[in-house]
Image (cartoon, rainbow, N blue to C red):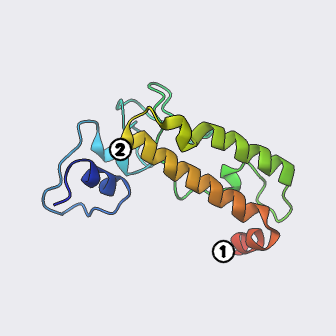
Amino acid sequence: MWGGRTGALLRVWGLWPAGVRGRRPLGCNAASLAGNNSPQCWNCGGPGVPKRGDGFFCPQCRALQPPDLTRDYFSLMDCNRAFGVDTAKLQNRYQQLQRLVHPDFFSQRSQTEKDFSEKHATLVNDAYKTLLAPLSRGLYLVS
């Protein structure tokens, strides 16, 4: 029912159960599409992105990698995990990340990278909004 690109995206986003009939492997190391838990790049099958650093791009082919949805907002935005946040530094980091992953910069790339870009940009937006406002930052800290 959901084959081709749609099925691939459902598998990437974790919405396609592993045992469902009709699941076809993609041509490029489909196991690594599940997220940053895999050490391999989804595009070239290379060693992938190290956990240190931002981890947005494959060091070999420079393909945008899937976002780590479990990553802490403070580490993503390069802030100390504390209630007091330097909002100027937060804004600079937000702008820096959006220049890296904004979907407008991926219009000529593969559909997979476009989708990853949208997910990265959404994650960065959510982190910025959460950490910018003191109330939501405090609630995020205690959660």
Above/below status of 53 relative to 69: above
Q: Which residue is mark 2?
A: 32
Q: Earlier in the sequence, mark 1 or mark 2?
A: 2
Query: Quarter-wise, where is residue 109 in the image?
Result: top left
Above/below status of 47 relative to 34: above
In 3D space, how far apart are the residues under numbered discs 1 and 2 (Cα atoms)?
30 Å
Q: Position of residue 73 (x, y in %)?
A: 66, 58
User: Which amino acid, mark 1?
Assistant: Ser
Q: Secondary structure at mark 2?
A: helix
Q: Is residue 15 left or right of residue 19?
A: right
Above/below status of 45 relative to 30: above
For the point 24% across and 60% down, which residue is it? 18
For the point 39% across and 37% down, which residue is it? 40
Q: Is residue 37 left or right of residue 135?
A: left
Q: Position of residue 17 (x, y in %)?
A: 26, 64
Above/below status of 31 relative to 58: below
Q: Secondary structure at mark 1?
A: loop
Quarter holding the N terminus?
A: bottom left
Mark 2 is surrounded, within 10 Å at the Cα level, by few (under 14), some (14 to 19) or many (20 or more) other residues, namely many
Q: Is residue 30 visible?
A: yes
Q: Which residue is mark 1?
A: 143
Query: Quarter-wise, where is residue 21 in the image?
Result: bottom left
Q: Are marks 1 and 2 in contact (CB under 8 Å)?
A: no
- List the single residue furthest toward the top: 60
Quarter holding the C terminus?
A: bottom right
Q: Is residue 86 left or right of residue 25?
A: right
Q: Which mark is residue 34?
A: none
For the point 37% across and 41% down, which residue is it? 111
User: Which amino acid, mark 2?
Assistant: Ser
Q: Position of residue 92 (x, y in %)?
A: 78, 44
